[in-house]
């Protein structure tokens, strides 16, 4: 990292240039560094991509990687002229905000579990020491269309968790999110709001006063996109991964069968973070998602502050209460694999952990076309499941302990 | 079994002579047959126990077995003069009832899983073909102090299960039990009431009309004690094991943290039957027991008829939904072992499955006194965990598949 601010400017640029969760950009930045990766993109837009230069650092690129890179470049080229990190930083400064980048002592290392999908930087309004804020934290999430029962439970849980010194993380939405933030604020504690749009935008507008209050009492609003960015639908979905990664555990208070809160729970499970679900009446559709998480063994049943604290305390100890205790490392790895498409999964199964296998042979073992195998190993490499070795590919053992 | 009715009379006598769940009596009857075991007891009461005659059949008795037998005999001797199975059968006949004994084609084989604690016979009012009635059955149990939410859920579940041809088994109590029976009756189906006292006694009295209706629409009231017997506290506890053994799965709709329904759920788990728990508001103490069962991984979350049917359908298939899927056979064996006291558990751990170990050596391995080891192996034998072989003891492999 360069000390002259170019790293910070480059990461601010990346956060404006690409959409949240872009693993191709993440991999490029991890490979070349934020500054050089940006230089490489700028040169590529002007003169075409320097694939040879990239392969010097990375090794031969699979066809699928090239395709993804080309597609990414085409998108980034459109935005590049409009990127103005200095303007965005001035905007942030006017809000009294701070920009955090990895390596900053205040950077929350809990986000590093996101790998190639980690944010390039965090635009923060309020308390900038997110590392300290998130050292002990629980995400409390749920439906916008919450019942008074759900809002009451969310408020009480957040109140109690805050009293015990834990930071409540949520998304600032109506319903469960707002009730959780309010419970934390009522207890005089700091709470973190992860926004899908810029930190200058109170979204939803009806919660503007709540968001201001949160900043006022030592909490923070954070976003991975610069001030002025709109909270689009895809950014909401990506925002859920940030909430899941911010909390040491995630608790779903109420959720419909399919909902954003369910997506947050699944993100947390993929990150191998404990997930809790608050039960409710079986006659309430607002609890159907929670019951689904319990039935599928993704969440542990939690009914009070002590049980949530136990859930959060179980990270790293290898001991998770209830159903979660029964999850073996294999189980967790297989749930993580659930995020792969069927072809990638078959290709992954075909890879040895020791002996490199050539793509043609992989295709034959997996029963897919050579083109499909090539695409899949590229995807698996990006996701950290496979690496190139000696002209072939080997599977990576993912540590799920 | 003798065809002249002496077997039936002997079993009717046993059901009046000993308290439900008496494993010493159960073991004696299993060893000698109901008729000879009764003769042996009658002779023992008059002339003292013929231990030598018993050891001819059984092998040498451990001191603990002798102690238990002596204690049992002392209790049985008090009741023996009052036992009059012919009077009880006349009483049953007046009620239009039937007495079922093992070997009768109408006997529900599902009760055989209770081993030495199986009932000697069943006193039935209503439909006598319990084998047919219980071929597809679910126990639906819960608190007497139920909420209107719980009663509604119990009614609806029973209604839906009955519509799908399953028999709902419960205990005829106020609250959840009554709501479950009512749901079955409302759907015009037969439901089974397992009573703690005699089938002539409507207990509780407030449910007398409901119990009559159940008999009237083809259901049945059953008890393992003769007509006229009081529903004592210990008989209620033992009744719970019969309910658990009668259903192919047990569903707890509402239960306080400690309650009879929780005991039924634990009986079902010990019998390796699937257990379901209906969630409810975390603010309702009536659901606290259900949430506890979910957290402890004893029960699967069930919210509707389809999920209960799936639970009941999972018996024998080795595939149980959700958290239950994670239970390995070892898990289940260890939960079954949870019913053993600490000394017995250590003694069991000290036993080999192949090489017989003498009691002195067992004591040394387990770190208990010789007297404790002797007591424990006797207990383990009664419970089916250990058997005598060649002057020593071996552990029995319990099939938990």
Image (cartoon, coloured by chain):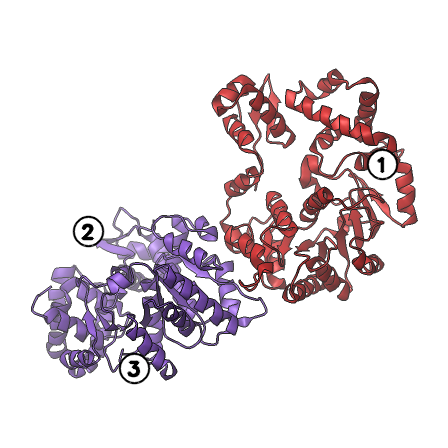
Chain colours: A purple, B red
Label 3, secondary structure: give it. Answer: loop
Say whether mark 1 and mark 2 are on the same chain. no
Q: Which residue is mark 1?
A: B8
Q: Which residue is mark 3?
A: A201
Closer to the camera: disc 3 or disc 2?
3
Q: Position of residue B190 (x, y in %)?
A: 77, 58
* Label 3, label 2: how far apart the Cα atoms are: 50 Å
Using residue A108 as the reference point, say whether residue B292 is left or right of it. right
Using the image as rendered, state which of residue A90 and residue B184 is in the foreground.
A90
Nearer the observer, disc 3 or disc 1?
3
Camera-near label (2 vs 1) is 1
Q: Chain of mark 2?
A: A
Percent x, y of residue A343: 37, 62
Residue B388 drawn at (x, y percent): 61, 22
Label 3: how many residues lie within 10 Å, few (<14), some (14-19) or many (20+)? some
Residue A47 placement (x, y as % from top left): 10, 77
Dot 2 and dot 1 residues touching (CB under 8 Å): no
Q: Circle 2 sits on which residue?
A: A390
């Amino acid at each position: 990292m360069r000390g002259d601010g170019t790293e910070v400017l480059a990461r601010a640029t990346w956060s404006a240039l690409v959409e949240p969760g872009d693993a191709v950009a993440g991999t490029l930045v991890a490979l070349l560094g934020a500054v050089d990766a940006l230089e490489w993109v700028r040169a590529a837009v002007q003169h075409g991509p320097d694939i040879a230069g990239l392969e010097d650092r990375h090794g031969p690129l699979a066809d699928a990687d090239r395709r993804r890179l080309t597609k990414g470049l085409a998108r980034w080229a459109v935005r590049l002229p409009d990127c103005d990190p200095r303007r965005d930083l001035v905007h942030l400064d006017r809000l009294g905000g701070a920009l955090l980048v990895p390596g900053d002592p205040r950077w929350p290392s809990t986000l590093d579990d996101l790998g190639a999908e980690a944010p390039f930087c965090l635009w923060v309004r309020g308390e900038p020491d997110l590392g300290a804020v998130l050292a002990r934290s629980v995400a409390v999430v749920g439906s916008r269309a919450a019942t008074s029962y759900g809002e009451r439970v969310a408020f009480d849980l957040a109140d109690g968790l805050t009293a015990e010194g834990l930071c409540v993380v949520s998304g600032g939405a109506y319903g469960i999110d707002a009730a959780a933030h309010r419970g934390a604020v009522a207890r005089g504690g700091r709470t973190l709001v992860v926004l899908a749009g810029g930190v200058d935008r109170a979204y939803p507008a009806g919660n503007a006063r709540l968001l201001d209050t949160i900043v006022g009492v030592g909490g923070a609003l954070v976003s991975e996109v610069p001030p002025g960015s709109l909270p689009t639908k895809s950014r909401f979905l990506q925002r859920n991964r940030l909430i899941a990664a911010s909390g040491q555990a995630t608790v779903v208070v109420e959720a419909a069968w399919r909902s954003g809160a369910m997506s947050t729970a699944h993100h947390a499970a993929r990150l191998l973070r404990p997930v809790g679900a608050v039960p409710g009446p079986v006659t309430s559709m607002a609890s159907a998602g929670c019951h689904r998480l319990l039935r599928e063994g993704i969440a542990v049943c939690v009914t009070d502050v002590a049980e949530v604290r136990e859930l959060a305390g179980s990270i790293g100890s290898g001991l998770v209460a209830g159903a979660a205790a029964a999850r073996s490392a294999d189980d967790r790895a297989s749930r993580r694999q659930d995020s792969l498409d069927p072809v990638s999964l078959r290709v992954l199964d075909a890879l040895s952990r020791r002996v490199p296998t050539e793509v043609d042979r992989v295709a034959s073992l997996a029963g897919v076309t050579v083109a499909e195998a090539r695409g899949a190993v590229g995807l698996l490499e990006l996701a950290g499941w496979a690496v190139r070795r000696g002209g072939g590919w080997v599977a990576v053992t993912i540590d799920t302990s």
